[in-house]
Amino acid sequence: MSQHDFEITTADANTGPSVRAAINAAMQALASNNSGATEPSTTYAYQWWSDTTTGIMKQRNAADTAWIARGLLASEWVTTGLGEMPSGVEFTGDIVGGSFSMNSSDATNDTDFGSIVCMDSTNTSLISSTSTITKRLDAAWAVGTGNGGLANGSKAVSTIYHLYAILKTSDNTVDFMYLANGDAIATYIPAGYAKYKWVGFVRTNAAGAICGYSFNCGTIKFFTASENVLSSTIGVTAATVNHAAKLPVTRIREISYAAGLASSANDNIFAIDTGSNISMYIGQGSTTSADTDTTAWGHPVYTVGGFVDYRGSRKFYTPTASQSLLCSAVKLIR
């Protein structure tokens, strides 16, 4: 530990040796970036602190009111195996990396988590990992890749599971976990893993398998249309649609809707944001097939639209027939 208040006082100047000792102590504190288990007693704007308790290099903010985590002491904290940090990206709030994907050996149950660098949910601790970690949804959480990832209960059908990066604060170990929608992470996060970051979600279908998806740059694209029906009863009266059964709505920034056929008739789906004016044309189903006859996007029965901002109060209707409203993709708030 080497810290100093960086003030050479009158008492220090009484003799030459005392002045020299005070200057040397200040220089040693600078050389070690004020290393210590607790923060320096006197702080300055933009001051560095090597926090040996958390293993994180921190820097004082411009107002000298708080510390900003800059990286891990024990590893490269600019490259971290992901290349140089992109221009404009700060650790506070942003996730660098943080990809997740269906495991090729067991896509029904497993998720592969890629490299990640981010701050935790409170913006006080750095979460950094260069490893690929596989976690199982069909087994209780256990530390390490290839082991269980479910923090509470057992895998259920037609359920949203939140994906979290979690940090063991004693040694900065990073792992991942699943948590069912509605479960409190503060209650079920594994012992010793006090910090976390939400990175995404998966959902199981009626058979209990993870619904097919791909993830890229904060966007989840769903593979199977029949698993992503928000409503199969869009009718002539404009009405809101419950999205919460399929999506963690507080984490959705934008959504791509699709129109699918729910009856033998063929018609359009429109959306209304406020009043009675049409705000969006979603698409037109095809008379060639009913919704339940296909499981893949691109079939003539589905018309996929572009991304629009998510609004839970938006209403949907179709002029003459019953149609299905589907979700083909979402952009996340991470």
Image (cartoon, rainbow, N blue to C red):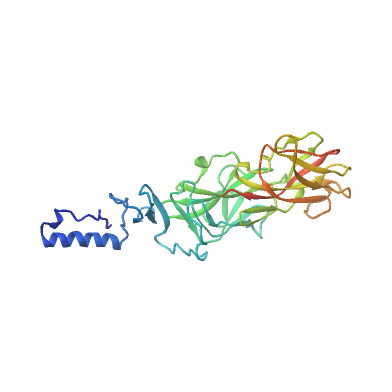
Say if residue 122 shows up in the picture: yes
Quarter in which the N terminus is drawn: bottom left
Q: Is residue 51 something one can see in this rendering?
A: no
Give the image location of residue 267, x and y in percent.
85, 43
Q: Is residue 111 above or below residue 311?
A: below
Point 54% across, 39% down: residue: 184
Kindly identify the residue that appears in the image at 12 percent across and 62 percent down. 16
Q: Nearer the viewer, residue 152 or 173?
A: 173
Q: From the top left corner, tell me how far across and down residue 224 is, in percent.
A: 74, 51
Locate residue 282, reporting x and y percent: 77, 46
Residue at image position (44%, 55%) is: 172
- Residue 135 lies, in percent from the top left, at 58, 54
Foreground: 135 or 263? 263
Q: Name the foreground residue: 307 vs 298.
A: 307
The count of marks equals 0
In the visual, does 97 lie left or right of 66? right
Q: Which residue is drawn at 14% across and 59% down?
A: 18
